[in-house]
Image: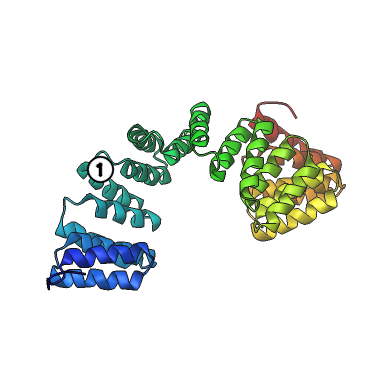
Amino acid sequence: MTTGGDLPTEFHYTARGQLALRAGQLHAAIDDFNHALEINDEFAPAYYYRGLAYRNGGDLNQAIADYTRAILADPEYPVPYYARGVVRRHLGFYEDAISDYSAAIELEPDDADYYYARGVARISLGRYADAITDFLACARINPDHANAQYNLGIAYRDSGDRETALEYYNRAIELRPGEPDYRYARGNLYSDRREYDAAIADYDAAIALVPTFANALYNRGIAKRNRGEPTEAIADFDLAQQCGMDTATLHHNRGVARADLGDHNAAIAEYEIAIEKNAELAGVWLSMGNSKAALGDFTAAIDAFGKAVEFNDGLAEAYRGRGLAYRALGNEDAAAADLMEYARRTGGTT
């Protein structure tokens, strides 16, 4: 470790600890950083790197404590602020993370990753304009930062600017064509725009890269149903379930696809599973009412439409469905009341 009989210093121990840290030898690394701090308990790099070791080992509280000690030892050292921000963001303390990233940026304003990290924290809080500013700053410093381009797409999409979002998704994919999340995100955007052929092409690409990509399989099923292909949609929903997705929305949408094929009994079985998983989804009750009505069970349909209204009294189609069910049972007063409510909410006619 040293030559000529020299005693090891905090620099020697910290350098050796970094080598152990890179090799994944966390205990050895922590031991070396401890030795460095025994020699100099104000040596900020040893606290920082020990924090990294604790973070890699899953002890996030100790990591934060070490990053804080590094900052106290050397307030002009930017990296511990950034590292502490990463852990705080992971723990959901977004405001604290943003403060840490801002401190790092003030000390080192030309580091693209600091702006990127702050943008991610801001987008988690729905602060899209601020997040966009950070991602653009990151991209100016490093034009090849694919994740910055990707997150610009997310921020613009979530703030309602789909055209600009598409531009940035395209740039991200040009920079990293083998990233499945980028293809998936652009597929979702195309689906938002009702460009289902393009959406399915992107989902296909994402699934080719990760065949067990459950969300991509599920959303491809949604796109196929919207394209008028319920049988193909059901196949994708089945694959998504095989890959671990078993949500109320999956059963609901598979039920809707079965109803598209005229198999309302199978559809109702799916809706019942969806309701077991989440009884407060108004859309599921609406679909249940439609299938019950299609089978001529108007009393059960009225109950289901009533549940839909209970959980979302702004769901106009539920009033219409219940009104028609009342009419089928000869209850014209109740039918007229619901159909008038439907017309009032939609600005149309019954």
Q: Nearer the viewer, residue 148 or 268?
A: 148
Alpha-carbon neighbours of circle 1 within 10 Å: few (<14), some, or many (≥20)? Answer: many
In the rendered structure, the answer to whether residue 38 lies left or right of residue 332 reads left
Q: Residue at image x 12%, y 73%? A: 5
- Callout 1, which amino acid? Ile
Dividing the picture into quarters, in which one does residue 3 lie? Answer: bottom left
Q: Position of residue 339 (x, y in %)?
A: 73, 35
Q: Nearer the viewer, residue 286 or 5?
A: 5
Q: Which residue is mark 1?
A: 105
Q: Quadrant of the C terminus?
A: top right
Scheme of image coloration: rainbow
Could you tell me which secondary element the residue under label 1 belongs to? Answer: helix
Q: Position of residue 141 (x, y in %)?
A: 32, 34
Image height of 99 relative to 350, above or below: below
Q: Nearer the viewer, residue 94 or 153?
A: 153
Q: Nearer the viewer, residue 316 or 18?
A: 18
Dividing the picture into quarters, in which one does residue 344 lie? Answer: top right
Q: Position of residue 100 (x, y in %)?
A: 27, 50
Could one spot residue 114 in this view of the protein?
yes
